[in-house]
Image (cartoon, rainbow, N blue to C red):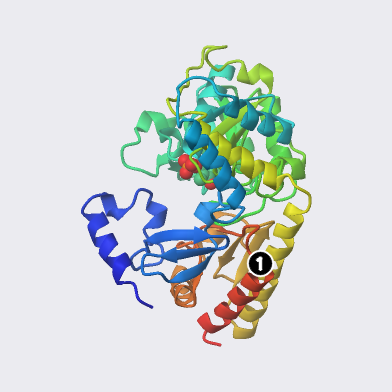
Amino acid sequence: MRRERSDELYGVARGLMPGGVNSPARSWTGVGGSPLFISRGKGSRIWDADDNGYIDYVCSWGPMILGHTHPEVLEAVKAAVDAGSSFGAPTEAENKLAGLVVDAFDSIDLVRFVSSGTEAGMSALRLARAFTGRDKIVKFGGGYHGHADSLLVSAGSGALAHGVPDSAGVTASLSADTLVAVYNDLGSVEALFDAVGDEIACVIVEPVAANMGVVLPAPGFLEGLRRITEDAGALLIFDEVITGFRLAYGGAQSLNGVVPDITCLGKIVGGGMPVGAYGGRAEVMETVCPLGPMYQAGTLSGNPVAMAAGAKTLELLAQPGVYDQLESRTARLEQGLRKIFEDSGTPLTINRTGSIMTLFFNPGPVEGWSGVEASDKEAFGRFFHAMIEEGVYLPPSPFEALFVSTAHTEADIDATVQSATKALGG
Ligand SMILES: *Cc1c(COP(=O)(O)O)cnc(C)c1O
């Protein structure tokens, strides 16, 4: 495989941007080697700067659920650009996407658009604090909600310990207000609420964890969070930045029936453009400026080009059969991979729901962060590189989800399984 051009571009990039990237997940530090530079995409495929083609299972980490350069999305974007790309004044495009979001999510009466999932999570926390008048928040170890300071905190030592920052530059006083519980362990949440329940503004959780690889909620876990938060007068925030419009049109909450107070959206809602959103019932959302005292703003929020991409994407996703197709294609991939890994004797646990899944090189089961961490990262790295050679682009990290789009055909899936057989040396 030729990769001279990618390597050359990476060399230039490293002289211009920290690590040569604008987001660390792109840098291949989790698998070793230097990243490929991508020059174009179409449907399920992407091509790198040396013109090698790949079946793409990153899909921009989720947004490209319709595949790359979907003609109807492109047309909507081009029409929006022709009309003017930003005004800093209300546009009808915002009404359109907001209407689609409010219709999709029963728990959302009012929605506010921002420009990233990070902004959505950061704003949702501020909203929960403003609404409850409390300072502390609860998150889960291994849960990712963007890079807002309060959320860059993972597991401290001991369930009641104050959070320890995951990043330099997060102040001790900020992380002290972030309490960290164990995903799928309601007891760890109850312990925090027993200790300081009247100071807790909210619990923020991915209803299906997808940033420590895919980890499904244990039966009763989300219901338990709903009960605990309600009893304590705290809000429940579902971060559906990945799961919204992905697992079902109405997100994970439409499948599990647990109703959050605030929902965070991102990724798919922008159809490949920078959009995030947070929304909830009117009583809560009326706290947001200019109706209420919680300040939050954005020069490019609700950008008309981004709104057009999001609205067209949602309209296409709302058509009948879309989620059944995503389910059956991804199930086919799961079954194919399961079989060849079994045949090769490589210990593997596949966690999948709908069109997201993770291959853990670990006999499993993987039901939380400790199982995730116990996976063989080197074995994943070898598999990743062998798949690249075979023309399959997996997420360059053992702890991420892979994403299937509506553009992935059965032939793509079967070719991927074939490639995996070769990658495993079969
Ligand atoms: C990607 C992600 C975010 C952050 O979104 P950005 O657009 O990258 O800022 C937040 N929460 C979850 C669950 C995510 O997967």
Q: Quadrant of the C terminus?
A: bottom right
Relative vertical location of residue 111 with respect to residue 65 in this rendering, above or below: above
Q: Residue at x 35, y 48 (%)?
A: 22
Residue 181 appears in view: no
**Three-letter amino acid code at the position of disc 1:** Thr
In the visual, does 283 lie left or right of 52? right
Give the SS element for disc 1. Answer: loop
Q: Residue at x 56, y 70 (%)?
A: 362
Crowding at label 1, few (<14), some or many (≥20) Cα neighbours within 10 Å?
Answer: some
Q: Quadrant of the N terminus?
A: bottom left
Query: Residue 200 location in percent, x, y?
Result: 56, 26
Look at the numbered disc 1 and say if its residue's Cβ is closer than 8 Å to ligand 1.
no
Q: Residue furthest left?
A: 15
In the foreground, 269 or 155: 269
In the foreground, 173 or 359: 359
* Marker count (numbered): 1
Q: Residue at x 54, y 18 (%)?
A: 130
The residue beneath circle 1 is 409
Residue 99 appears in view: yes
Asked where in the image residue 50 lies, by quadrant, the reply is bottom left
Relative vertical location of residue 384 with respect to residue 149 in this rendering, above or below: below
Q: Residue furthest bottom?
A: 426
In the visual, does 257 lie left or right of 180? right
Query: Residue 39 location in percent, x, y?
Result: 40, 60
Relative vertical location of residue 33 with respect to residue 79 in this rendering, above or below: below
Relative vertical location of residue 132 with respect to residue 37 in this rendering, above or below: above
In the foreground, 18 or 167: 18
Query: Residue 76 location in percent, x, y?
Result: 57, 41
